[in-house]
Amino acid sequence: MTRKPKLAREKTPIERRGQKFVDLLRNNGEESDGKVGTITDPRIGIALGGGSARGLTHVPFIEAMDELGLKPHVISGTSIGALIGSGWANGMTGKELREFSFNVLGTMRIIAGRLWATQVRGLGGIFQNGLSVQLDAMRIVDAFTPPGHPEDFKDLKIPLYVVATDFQSWHQVVFNSGLLRPAIAGSIAIPSLFKPVAYANHLLVDGGVVNPLPLDQAAADSDILIGIDVNGDPSEQLNRTDHKVLDIWFGSAQIMMHSLIAHMMAAYPPDIYMRPHLTGVGALEFWRVKEIVANGERDKERFKRAVSQKIEDFILRQQKNVSEGQPRAFRQARK
């Protein structure tokens, strides 16, 4: 069977403007002959925050980047942000991440089947009665990553920084090389719900304990810094008094992470900050994936406009440098 040749994708307006800027740099400020190359500027760093099931709202923002024809220069992730970020860094599109999430999380029966297949037991009791068993984070990663997922960071297509917490030293641990799965397992290991993960001379628990939105890890060498905060907000709790034990535990963790994120944003102010407004979804209600992802879509167009504007501003600044006779100094400063 003869394969049909792939049609070239039409460049987006951002790509066309960016290519014009790159051509100007390559020709010392003079217009090029119109030949196109590969656009590499601006370099976009994206931090994907932790938030348990709420983290599924990362998917529409990844789709938005695809629709703009953009890929990040670097991805950092905490907890579910690390898990989803690893798929993105491996080359999965937002659409593929959406479809995979729907396939593996669509119902409680599907989730239970995948967990049973990897010998994870007792999850139903946790959902209904609270913390009665501790789960193995490595088996969770095995159950909810696609077949053929890379074993090592070096096999990813985009640099990825995974944030976890060392329970013994009380410090942040960042992984960007070596084995990928134990690093992600450590990053998602919610205290008490999961057993700590022993890896690389650390005893790891959830990265959200120290850094729920790892802007610091995405900021280096990035021209545009984006933070996606999926920690949630207090609005759904304001009029409730019937909190279960698990609600109190996760709610207290949200309060702690909210404070940590505020401090991180003061130290590493993002150029674009998105915080999807999601209410009424429990931290472990992953089976509501379609509803959660649909909720994130409400901010998708606003996100695309914000990214487009930041890129235009970046290009205009550099074009101004070129017109002022500074292209050579700019190129040297970027090396």
Image: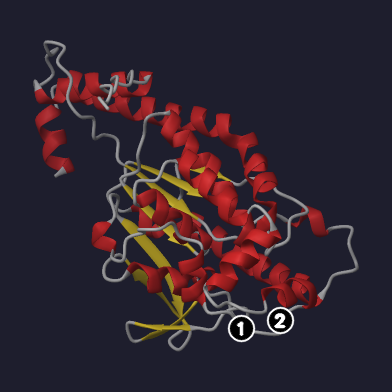
Local packing at callout 2 (Cα closer than 10 Å; few below 14, some 14-19, many 20+) is some
Pointers 1 and 2 in contact (C-beta within 8 Å): yes
- Residue farthest toward the front in the current orientation of the protein: 1
For the point 81% across and 59% down, the residue is: 237
Amino acid type assigned to the residue bearing label 2 in the image: Leu
Q: Position of residue 238 (x, y in %)?
A: 84, 58
Looking at this view, is 302 or 329 the one in front? 302
- The answer to whether 83 appears left or right of 236 in the picture is left
Looking at this view, is 324 or 208 the one in front? 208
If the image is split into quadrants, where does the C terminus sit?
top left
For the point 53% across and 44% down, the residue is: 99
Number of marks in the rendered image: 2
- The answer to whether 24 appears left or right of 114 in the picture is left
Residue 74's tag is none
Residue 315 quadrant: top left
Amino acid type assigned to the residue bearing label 1 in the image: Gln
Residue with the mark numbered 2: 131
Q: Position of residue 111 (x, y in %)?
A: 63, 62
Give the structural element (helix, strand or loop) at label 1: loop
- Residue farthest toward the bottom in the current orientation of the protein: 168
If the image is split into quadrants, where does the N terminus sit?
top left
Residue 134's tag is 1
Q: Is residue 140 among the parts visible in the rendering?
A: yes
Query: Up-down: is 6 above or below 33?
Result: below
Residue 12 quadrant: top left
- The answer to whether 140 appears left or right of 109 in the picture is left
Q: Position of residue 274 (x, y in %)?
A: 56, 44
Query: Up-down: is 300 above or below 37?
Result: below
Q: Is residue 229 among the parts visible in the rendering?
A: no
Looking at this view, is 186 or 277 the one in front? 186
For the point 21% across and 25% down, the residue is: 321
